[in-house]
Image: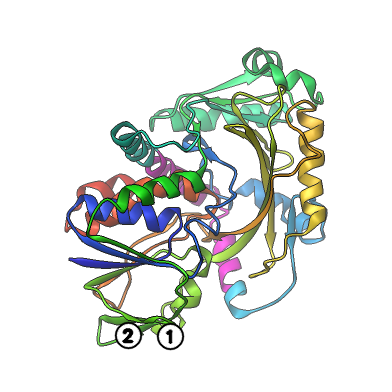
């Protein structure tokens, strides 16, 4: 079987790798000049298997009025009403119910654990260099109520394969001494021992090099996709500025831009771009060894080789590509406060913004597209594309190979 994949980010390239392993021919198309140039380029770096909590939750619902009026500096909603956004928003609110949040959390956690196994298989077989570290993750919590809630959540997740502990402030500092250099604004937190970190951009580059060893792999960069041409229950071609591409089956893996490609197919994919930012600086002696998430400020800190990555902020502003300097400055200020010796904050290596492809439930869309027998979707991974990529690729590959076993774990 010949499979055409639309998108050369971490989702598209891991899908290509999984299909090649099963003996399929693969062609990947992307308009960028290199691989992993979108959301895969500058994300937070955390492989957050234990903390793939859906964005829609009762807690977020309580804070929504404050966010709407601009009271939360880490979250911004720009008022640009559209039917699509209203529909998406109503579905999001439905997923803020306690039962829906619990169900979505369990499903995401199962997929994350499955994805961890898939990534480890790649690492063990090929020894790729992408600053991979099994360093654990710390989530800082600001109140005793947060700690109490965390204990219940950890108990559930530990039954699914996580190894999470709730620790007080003193125990967290013993575990991660660099936290003592920052403010006394957390009472404790969660330590997730199985969580890891790695540079997703470097991972995709190494994985593409591996795919190129196969004569069945073809990569077409700098190729602008005009439209997906539909036929009767089948996709007949991908129209590009370099001509038409044809295959037996197709996988749509264009992240937040996936819905833009399905308009003429009459497929309404419930994916909306959630804009985020990151800044990368040279690492300092006071950087954390474990990855750290500041839950109050919605910011993550992650050491990647000789760099420190600071990422966060969530903006519902549509397909806005601007890198706003005030957001970069905001992230740097938070890092300077939390880890004063964590990096050379005056030397910025990279400023980045990207669109996280968010669904109302935070569950990715993985599987065959309705109405078309040869079109598959692998998109909508939200804030956790890097964490879920390898497992999602295996699910799609198994699905296209006619097997049921892998996707049962996600359901």
397 magenta-colored: no
Q: Residue at x 62, y 15 (%)?
A: 175
The mark found on residue 230 in the picture is: 2
* Circles 1 and 2 in contact, beta carbons < 8 Å: yes
Viewer-side residue, 132 vs 137: 132
Q: Residue at x 51, y 29 (%)?
A: 154
- Label 2: which secondary element: strand
Q: Main secondary structure of the magenta part?
A: helix
Magenta stretch bounds: 87-112
User: Residue 96 location in percent, x, y?
Assistant: 58, 54
How many numbered callouts? 2
Q: Residue at x 49, y 32 (%)?
A: 196
Q: Viewed as shown, does residue 282 lie left or right of 359?
A: right
- Mark 1 is surrounded, within 10 Å at the Cα level, by few (under 14), some (14 to 19) or many (20 or more) other residues, namely few
Which residue is identified by label 1?
A: 264
User: Residue 239 location in percent, x, y?
Assistant: 38, 83
Q: Viewed as shown, does residue 195 lie left or right of 206?
A: right
Q: Can residue 99 be spotted in the picture?
A: no
**Looking at the image, is mark 1 or mark 2 earlier in the sequence?**
2
Viewer-side residue, 317 vs 201: 201
Q: Residue at x 16, y 58 (%)?
A: 402
Viewer-side residue, 188 vs 18: 18
- Mark 2 is surrounded, within 10 Å at the Cα level, by few (under 14), some (14 to 19) or many (20 or more) other residues, namely some
- Label 1: which secondary element: helix
Q: How much space separates mark 1 and mark 2, taking CA atoms?
A: 8 Å
104 magenta-colored: yes
Q: Which quarter of the picture shows residue 167?
A: top right
Q: Is residue 80 above or below residue 303?
A: below
Q: Is residue 68 above or below residue 374?
A: above
């Amino acid at each position: 079987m010949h499979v055409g994949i639309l998108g050369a980010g971490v989702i598209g390239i891991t899908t290509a790798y999984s299909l090649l392993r099963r003996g399929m021919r693969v062609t990947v198309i992307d308009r960028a000049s290199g691989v992993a140039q979108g959301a895969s380029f500058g994300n937070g770096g955390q492989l957050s298997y234990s903390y793939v909590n859906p964005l829609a939750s009762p807690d977020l619902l309580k804070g929504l009025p404050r966010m709407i009026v601009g009271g939360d500096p880490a979250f911004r909603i720009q008022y640009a009403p559209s039917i699509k956004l209203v529909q998406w928003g109503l579905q999001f609110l439905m997923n803020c119910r306690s039962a829906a949040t619990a169900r979505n959390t369990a499903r995401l956690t199962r997929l994350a654990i499955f994805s961890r196994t898939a990534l480890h298989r790649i690492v063990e077989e090929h020894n790729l260099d992408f600053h991979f570290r099994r360093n654990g993750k710390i989530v800082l919590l600001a109140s005793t109520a947060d700690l109490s809630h965390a204990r219940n959540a950890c108990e559930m997740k530990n039954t699914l394969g996580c190894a999470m502990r709730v620790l007080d402030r003193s125990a967290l500092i013993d575990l991660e001494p660099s936290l003592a250099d920052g403010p006394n604004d957390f009472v404790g937190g969660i330590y997730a021992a199985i969580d890891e970190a790695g540079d997703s951009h470097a991972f995709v580059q190494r994985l593409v090099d591996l795919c190129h060893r196969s004569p069945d792999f073809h990569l077409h960069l700098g190729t602008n996709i005009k439209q997906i041409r539909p036929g009767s229950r089948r996709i007949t071609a991908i129209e590009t500025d370099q001509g038409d591409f044809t295959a037996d089956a197709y996988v749509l893996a264009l992240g937040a831009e996936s819905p833009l490609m399905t308009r003429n197919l009459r497929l309404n994919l419930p994916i909306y771009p959630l804009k985020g930012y990151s800044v990368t600086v040279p690492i300092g002696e006071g950087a954390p060894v474990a990855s750290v998430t500041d839950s109050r400020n919605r910011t993550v800190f992650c050491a990647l080789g000789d760099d420190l990555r600071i990422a966060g902020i969530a903006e519902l502003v549509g397909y806005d590509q601007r890198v706003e300097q005030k957001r970069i400055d905001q992230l740097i200020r938070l890092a300077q406060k939390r880890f004063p010796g964590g990096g050379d904050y005056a030397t910025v290596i990279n400023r980045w913004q990207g669109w996280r492809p968010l669904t109302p439930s935070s569950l990715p869309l993985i599987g065959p597209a309705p109405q078309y027998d040869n079109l598959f979707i692998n998109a909508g991974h939200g804030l956790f594309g890097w964490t879920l990529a390898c497992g999602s690729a295996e699910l799609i590959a198994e699905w296209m190979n006619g097997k049921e076993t892998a996707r049962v774990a996600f359901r």
